């Protein structure tokens, strides 16, 4: 009886240790997801161009002062870093983790960012600290640390003799509303004409669009995005094998664009699973993610 009891205790202890290690691995270790994307009209100088994307930090740290995250991205030797929003939380002063990352990253490559819904909400909320300029200080810090914010803006990035276009889209907050609940006002949807009204017509050159919300992939394609980089969904919080992410921040079960690569004709979208949490502080089969994209010419 004593031996049997001791065996049960060993099994329980082993199971508990395994679960704790699994939880730590799932929630506190970085996964690098690699993509090689080919384009027939890719400018020659951008063949082999290395893009790193991060998203949805929400105060999460990897190593002291996020030095682990900074060093991991540096080791990938990116030509450019794209940050697709929600690097702060709207109701918690947690943006310091993002600033610490930027300090340790130390402008290792050019950095471009679009706003997420949490940044947009924070810009409209009463201040959470003694300083009543939280959002403006956040934007000023980004600029001082070398991040170029694309708030409904376009920038041309040059490499050698060639260039590509980078756009950052800031939709209205009502564009995050659920379209699967009746009655639904179609005027709340983000349309191709809306994108054109804030970003202009898409040029004929290669166009990369930073857009936090992936729900409007079809509209991004119609507008003229060759590559869209998004986040927001947090990978679906819990990923179920063969089914994908369980639900989105809008509480839509099994969202269509949960994580990974999506394609429509020649256009592509990568949805990054993000680094931190939103309202649910757990990730399951859904490790924090860094996306590494290498652009290639079609042979």
Image (spheres, grey):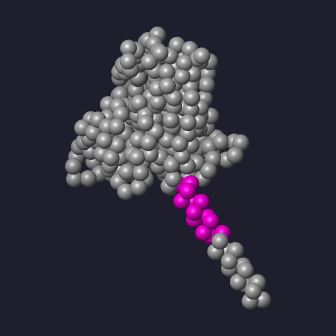
Residue drawn where x is 40% and y is 46% of the image: 71
Magenta span: helix, strand or loop, mainly? helix
Q: Along the line of sight, which residue is nearer the eye, 173 or 263?
A: 263
Q: Quadrant of the C terminus?
A: top right
Which percent across, then down, holds residue 228? Answer: 50, 26
Which percent across, then down, holds residue 260? Answer: 59, 36
Which percent across, then down, holds residue 180? Answer: 60, 34
Residue that extends furthest to the top in the rendered view of this protein: 204
Residue 140 on the magenta span: no
Residue drawn where x is 69% and y is 42% of the image: 243
Residue 21 on the magenta span: yes
The reply to whether residue 156 is in sight is yes
The reply to whether residue 116 is in sight is no
The image quadrant that residue 136 belongs to is top left
Residue that extends furthest to the bottom in the rendered view of this protein: 2
Instruction: Report the side of 241 relative to 105 (left or right).
Output: right
Which percent across, then down, holds residue 242? Answer: 71, 42
In the image, which residues are magenta? 15-27
Q: Quadrant of the N terminus?
A: bottom right
Q: Along the line of sight, which residue is nearer the eye, 244 or 253?
A: 244
Instruction: Report the side of 79 relative to 14 (left or right).
Output: left
Q: Along the line of sight, which residue is nearer the eye, 100 or 244?
A: 100
Instruction: Report the side of 127 relative to 230 (left or right).
Output: left
Please give the count of numbered marks on the rendered protein.
0
Q: Is residue 259 above or below residue 159?
A: below
């Amino acid at each position: 009886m004593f031996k049997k009891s001791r065996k049960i205790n060993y099994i329980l202890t082993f199971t508990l240790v395994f679960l704790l290690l699994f939880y730590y691995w799932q929630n506190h270790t970085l996964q690098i997801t690699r993509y090689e994307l080919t384009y027939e009209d890719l400018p020659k100088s951008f063949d082999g161009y290395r893009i790193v994307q991060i998203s949805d930090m929400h105060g999460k740290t990897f190593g002291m002062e996020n030095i682990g995250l900074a060093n991991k991205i540096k080791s990938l030797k990116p030509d450019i870093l794209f940050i697709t929003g929600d690097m702060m939380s709207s109701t918690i002063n947690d943006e310091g983790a993002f600033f610490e990352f930027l300090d340790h990253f130390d402008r290792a490559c050019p950095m471009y960012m679009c706003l997420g819904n949490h940044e947009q909400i924070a810009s409209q909320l009463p201040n959470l600290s003694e300083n009543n300029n939280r959002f403006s200080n956040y934007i000023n810090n980004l600029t001082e640390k070398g991040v170029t914010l694309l708030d409904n803006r376009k920038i041309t990035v040059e490499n050698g003799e060639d260039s590509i276009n980078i756009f950052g889209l800031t939709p209205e907050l009502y564009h995050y509303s659920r379209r699967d609940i009746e009655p639904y006002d179609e005027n709340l949807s983000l349309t191709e004409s809306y994108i054109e009204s804030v970003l202009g017509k898409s040029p004929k050159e290669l166009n990369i669009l930073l857009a936090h919300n992936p729900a409007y992939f079809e509209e991004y394609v119609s507008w003229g995005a060759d590559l869209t980089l998004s986040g927001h969904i947090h990978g679906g919080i819990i990923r179920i094998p063969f089914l994908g992410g369980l639900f989105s921040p809008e509480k839509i079960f099994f969202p269509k664009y949960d994580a990974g690569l999506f394609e429509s004709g020649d256009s592509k979208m990568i949805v990054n699973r993000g680094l931190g949490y939103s309202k649910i502080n757990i990730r399951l089969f859904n490790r924090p993610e860094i996306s590494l994209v290498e652009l290639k010419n079609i042979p």
